[in-house]
Image (cartoon, rainbow, N blue to C red):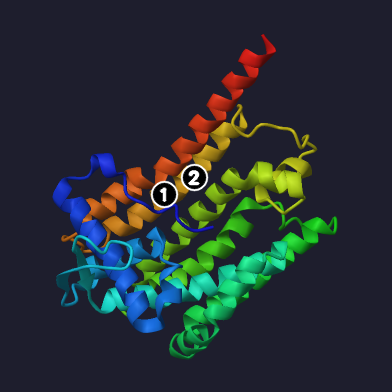
Amino acid sequence: MFGYIYVNEQELKLREYTTYRSFYCGLCQELHHRYGRRAQMVLNYDTTFLAIVLTGLYEPETLTEEKRCLLHPVHKHPMAKNDAIGYAADMCVLLAYQKGMDDWEDERRVSGRTAAALLGSAYKEIAARYPRQTKAVEENIRLLHEAEDGWKDGRTLDGLSDDIDYVAGLTGNFLGELYVWKDDIWQGDLRQIGFYLGKFIYLLDAVEDIEKDRKHGNYNVIEAVLRAKGRSESEDIWEEPYRSEIQKILAGMMTEASRAFERLPVLEYAPIIRNILYSGVWCKYTALRDKSEKKKKGRESAAQ
């Protein structure tokens, strides 16, 4: 589900991109330092963004060193290290463990169960250190499973399974809690950033996976909405009016996340954060849209 909160590289200055990569590589190094090589496999852009936001807000002492790594042994790369990156590493493992378990329970993916097993001891350690965040993830994923199971059984849990706000909001709920690092005056805005990013991630993931989910009979909130409205399973969500409706919902989510960020007193790294919020998050959406249009043109050419 994760990997959508990324920069638009073309719109970043070289210095800014180098800084961004120092956080990404620093997070990778921190995962290795805390939990071993196996944890580096769950590195993602979403928790890199979390590390940058928290560093920009709280301004912890940050050390950046040039180091080589296993994937890039020839040249040294800048790697940032601070307490916010350490927290992001813990949240990265927390999410990865739950994703592995979710993949196993939903689709019986052996890879998911294996990943969760490899991170089991680390997860217990993190759960003991961050009970609030762990409870939020576990409880909202449980509710998400209820909505999915209800849909598969022909029920809708009083309409909740086909309610985009409710279902996407479950991911928003737990990601919002992960964004709250400290109990202070900034926690409301941080929680709002995480909440709307979580909803955005969930819905965009549903957009990307709808064809696969239809093929395998898996739950997809967009498909659930279409069926509730009596639509055909063959409806193309890249055609109007679906395309405009989905884009409007996604834009609304990012507007709220960006509005919350702009209330925070972040100066350093603000250009990188704004690049991601206002541009980077749309790169995946644009790629999916272009892919759909290319497939459509191919079908039309074949039919002629």
Residue furthest right in the image: 154
Foreground of the two, 198 or 115: 115
**Residue topped by disc 2:** 250
Residue 157 seen anywhere in this rendered image of the structure: no
Amino acid type, label 2: Leu
Q: Are marks 1 and 2 in contact (CB under 8 Å)?
A: yes
**In the depicted view, which residue is nearer to us: 221 or 215?**
215
Query: Circle 2 sits in a helix, a strand or a loop, which is it?
Result: helix
| Residue at the extreme front | 74
Quick one: SS at disc 1?
Answer: helix
In the image, residue 48 above or below residue 6: below
Total residue callouts: 2
The circle drawn on residue 254 is 1
- From the top left corner, tell me how far across and down residue 120 is, in percent: 55, 83
Please state if 250 lies on the left or on the right of 304 as rendered: left
The residue sitting at 45% across, 68% down in the picture is 41
Q: From the viewer's perspective, is 222 left or right of 156?
A: left
Q: CA gap, disc 1 to disc 2?
A: 6 Å
